[in-house]
Amino acid sequence: MTSQKTQGPLAGISIVDMTTVVMGPYATQILADYGADVIKVEAPGGDVLRLAAPSRHHGMGAAFLQANRNKRSIVLDVKKEKGRAALLRLCRTADVFIHNVRPAAMKRARLADSDMRAENAKLIYVSLIGYGEGGPYAGRPAYDDLIQGLSGLPALHAEVAGEEPRYVPLTMVDRIMGVSAAHTVLAALVHRERAGVAQTIDVPMFETMAQLVLGDHMGGRTFDPPAGPPGYPRLLAPDRRPYKTSDGYICVLIYNNKEWETFFRAIGKSEQFAADKRLSDHAVRTQHYSEVYKIVADILTTRSTAEWLKLLGENDIASVPLHDLNSLIDDPHLEAVGFFQKMDHPTEGPIRLTGIPSQWSDTPPAITKHAPLLGEQSVEILREAGLSEAEISALVAEGATVDGRPNRKK
């Protein structure tokens, strides 16, 4: 018997996942890592993320491999009646159904929450959407870049850097949405356990990002009437950035009065610190972040990165080198804590996956399954749902599913 310690904290939870690309798959990756049985429902063409380069074989791109480990794949064409019926069968015994299809399309497909609950009254129904249904943007297309722009991130970059607006070079909205959706599912599961009620939940991209951005930057508009403009001055200071040294860059944060005093003493400029209230007085400093960060920026150009890391470390001032992607992957701390996990994929060979950051004393999450081939577990999952071999064969023949087992007889 498999021990609880090897199953993860969500062992026994079943999730039917009809999401694509990054937002939804990242949410269900987290839940799968925690031990939930995530059944990834894909259309016959597969999740488009499968095509994201680089890849060794068609349909198994690097980003897909990262976001879909620990899941099982079933192909269902829900536009066909048999495919739709099979999806409903899966949901009869599931705990959660999650999708990122526009609500109007789900209603047309007769896959709205009421359709699912007719099969399973205990099913938690989660919709990952662009905009809340009550507003004028409801139903519009929503992608990471669009929501970044609408939530003001490129404008913040332009304001601080004095450059053209730019998107953050991450699928940042999708990743934040994934985390938000995962904790929403967990909260809904707890509520169902306590109250016996399965809820319908919408998790909108725009509102989620507006909360995140304005949590820092509501500023004076927190008050009614406003006490000043929006924005958090420290975060908007032009020199709050990696500092240039004589041979590279370094990331430093001198925060409280003690650290500011220690920094100026370490570089032999205690008198400058004592004479300048912008440096020595926290209340005054908060009104002059742009100026004090510029003072630090000028000082840090005078020595090498290695010299600064040594001096700042000796004085317990927070500092780290500036990583690029290669040095991040090769970071010695990540190596020491075993952050990356290597595994052999049946078609892609040896691969390296980002690990699970949290550490658990009793039910540790684990990466136990490779990202699936398209429809790799279709037959297995349909059998578990109670379909007969004849019914499964009919689904395959009609094109409503795909038997993606790698070693099946052709």
Image (cartoon, helix red, strand yellow):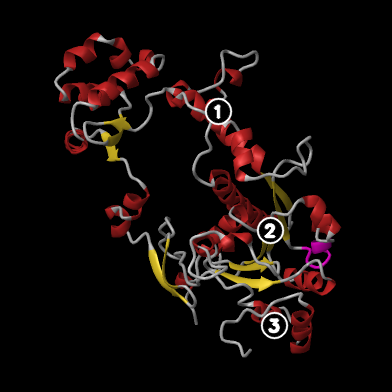
Is 117 one of the magenta-colored residues? yes
Q: Are marks 1 and 2 in contact (CB under 8 Å)?
A: no
Q: Secondary structure at mark 1?
A: helix
Q: Give 104 or 284, whichever is nearer the viewer.
A: 104
Residue wearing tag 1: 155
- Residue 368 placement, left or right of 92: left
Residue 67 on the magenta span: no
- The residue lying toward the viewer, choosing from 258 and 289, is 289
Q: Earlier in the sequence, mark 1 or mark 3?
A: 1
Q: Earlier in the sequence, mark 1 or mark 2?
A: 2
Q: Residue furthest top?
A: 275
Q: Position of residue 81 (x, y in %)?
A: 84, 71
Q: Residues within 10 Å of mark 1 (few under 14, many from 20)?
A: some
Amino acid tagged 2: Ile
Which circle marks residue 383 in the picture?
A: 3
Q: Could you tell whether 204 is left or right of 237 in the image?
A: right
The answer to which image quadrant residue 134 occupies is: top right
Image quadrant in which you'd find residue 224:
top right
Q: Quadrant of residue 304?
A: top left
Can you give x and y, in whole percent of width and height, for residue 77 in the image?
76, 69
Could you tell me how far apart the alpha carbons at marks 3 and 2 are, in whole angstroms? 22 Å
Looking at numbered disc 3 in the image, what kind of residue is underneath it? Arg
- Which disc number belongs to residue 98? 2
- Secondary structure of the residue carrying tag 3 is helix
394 with respect to 14 (left or right): right
For discs 1 and 2, the disc positioned in front in the rendered view: 1
User: Crowding at label 3, few (<14), some or many (≥20) Cα neighbours within 10 Å?
Assistant: some
Residue at 59% over, 58% down: 25
Secondary structure beneath disc 2? strand
Which mark sits nearer the N-terminus, 3 or 2? 2
Question: Which residue is at a point 46% across and 68% down the rendered structure image?
Answer: 367
